[in-house]
Image: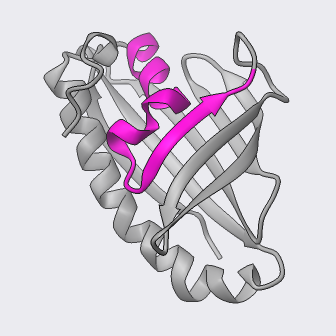
Amino acid sequence: MAAIVSTVEVAGTPDEVFAYVVDPDRFPEWQAGVLGGQLEGETAEVGAKCTTTRRIGGRERTVVSELVRLDPPRAWGVRGIDGPIRAAVDVTVEPVPGRRACKVRIDVDFEGHGIGKVLVPLLVRPQSRREMRGNMTRLKQRLDAAGGSASDDRGTAG
């Protein structure tokens, strides 16, 4: 199946927008169900592990992904490496000519392993489609309200 593709235009420079969108510590601010995120190591680099904790089906689940693409401030990609449902997420940030704004595109796809082969088409993809609409709305609200730099307002997420 094709990836779920979501796009939104947000305020900010490519550096500001990219830094916010790909920071796992900030995921709970704009991604539904995310309770926490963390990237191993001092700096992001290809091969680094990204751990995300989500509330799924009323339970907390932690998944590990590997950073497979890093081209700041344009592109970032991770691939799930454990569990029955493994996400592939690709983020691109493109400046909007003549404006202090960027277009953010997020492509999400899933690979099922074991029971995940059944869950991906029946539950995971439909839920992800619904969540991505809200996620992109929250992302836009956060970055537009901060003028593109959400680095000063931690703890004010709604």
Residue 131, image x, y percentages: 37, 63
Could you tell me which residue is drawn at 57 percent across and 49 percent down? 53
**Which residue is at the front of the view, 94 or 132?**
132
Q: Position of residue 97 (x, y in %)?
A: 31, 18
Quadrant in the picture for residue 132? bottom left
Residue at 34% from the left image edge and 37% from the top image edge: 29
Q: Quadrant of residue 133?
A: bottom left
Depicted 65 relative to depicted 99: above or below = below
Identify the magenta region.
14-40
Q: Is residue 105 left or right of residue 113?
A: left
- Look at the image and tell me in which quarter the C terminus lies: top left
Q: Nearer the viewer, residue 96 or 147?
A: 147
Q: Position of residue 44 (x, y in %)?
A: 70, 18
Q: Quadrant of residue 82?
A: bottom right
Examine the structure image and report whether residue 35 is included in the region drawn in magenta. yes
| Residue at image location 55% in from the left, 75% down from the top | 124
Picture coordinates of residue 42, whole percent (x, y):
71, 10
Of 114 and 20, the residue lying toward us:
114
Q: Quadrant of the N terminus?
A: bottom right
Residue plotted at (50% across, 28% down): 25
